[in-house]
Amino acid sequence: MKAYYHLPGLFEFYELYKAFLPLFREHREYFYDWCEIGSIYGAPADCLWGGGRVGFGDEQAVDVIKLMKEYDISARLTFSNSLIQPEHLHDKRCNRLLELFDTNGDTKNGVIIYSDILLDYIKENYPNYYFVSSTTKVLTDFEDLRDELNREEFKYVVPDFRLNKALDKLNTLSRDQKDKVEFLCNECCSFGCADRKACYENVSRKSLGEDCADHICKSPQASVGYRFSDAMANPAFISTEDTQNIYLPAGFSNFKIEGRSLGSAIVLEFLLYYMTKPEYQLRVREEIYLDSSLDLF
């Protein structure tokens, strides 16, 4: 069994992937043979249906599509706004994105989604997509997760990161249910955070253009922002060793890496840590850093 990593920044880190994907294809020996790229997800800036994190990518969709087709990678549109109403369904820009990403050769593209209103709309009008139940639903109760896994609409379900280590319960899932679980590996949010859903809702309001105050994070680490070292210290962190020694043997194979709202430099560190053999990490880092077209900071 292989691990499939679902990577951040479809639009946001287009330039990074344009440099990284040729290395991944042409020098497969640099990377672990037990993992593959399952998808790359994201949304352009100012996307009405967007949610989860504020997108900032401004790459042209046609360029993104061309890159994903070239490397046979599933593209996922992050349409996880939790506050979608019927009047939002006919947004021209979001519908145009669905039209553009509707086909990807033999590789199906997906939509990360929260709203059932939007889910039903896309199913009816763009039937070629698969769907991923968004972690913005904050599924912290295991029975809620089980119910979500039983929904036929979803190919994958991303539980709240605080269920990552509930292995006694996770191991009771059926084979088909395990195939649908997609763990969020590198969350830096405080394990005890009670405001996670409110934080996501604030992003949804901003995506809809509402004039609202920023959500104020109460985490002790909020003032320093995201640090991978802090994420590694989170009780829910899933390491490469965990992936190989615990999750893959237990029958879980899908792992999401967060990072859409971060910078290219830290996302590169995720690619190095999760996918690159230690003896080749410096070489891959140098190849990327020496690409003069990239602004990594």
Image (tube, grey):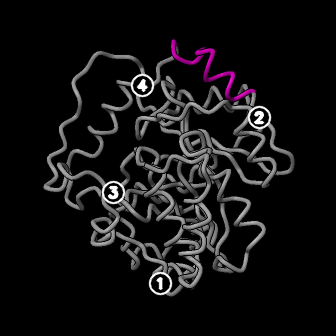
Residue drawn 60% across the image and 14% down it: 90
- Name the residue type under label 3: Thr
Could you tell me the amino acid type at mark 1?
Glu
Q: Secondary structure at mark 2?
A: loop
Residue 279 percent coordinates (x, y): 56, 85
Percent across and percent down for residue 161 are 37, 61
Sequence-wise first label, 3 or 2? 2
> Within 10 angstroms of label 4, few (less than 14), some, or many (20 or more) residues?
many
Q: Which residues are magenta?
A: 87-99
Q: CA distance from mark 2 to mark 1?
A: 36 Å
Q: Residue at x 28, y 39 (%)?
A: 199
The residue singled out by tag 2 in the image is 102
Q: Between disc 4 and disc 3, whose residue precedes?
A: 3
Q: Residue 241: which numbered mark, if any?
A: 1
**Side of 16 relative to 75 (left or right):** left
Q: Secondary structure at mark 3?
A: loop
Q: Nearer the viewer, mark 3 or mark 2?
A: 2
Label 1, secondary structure: give it: helix
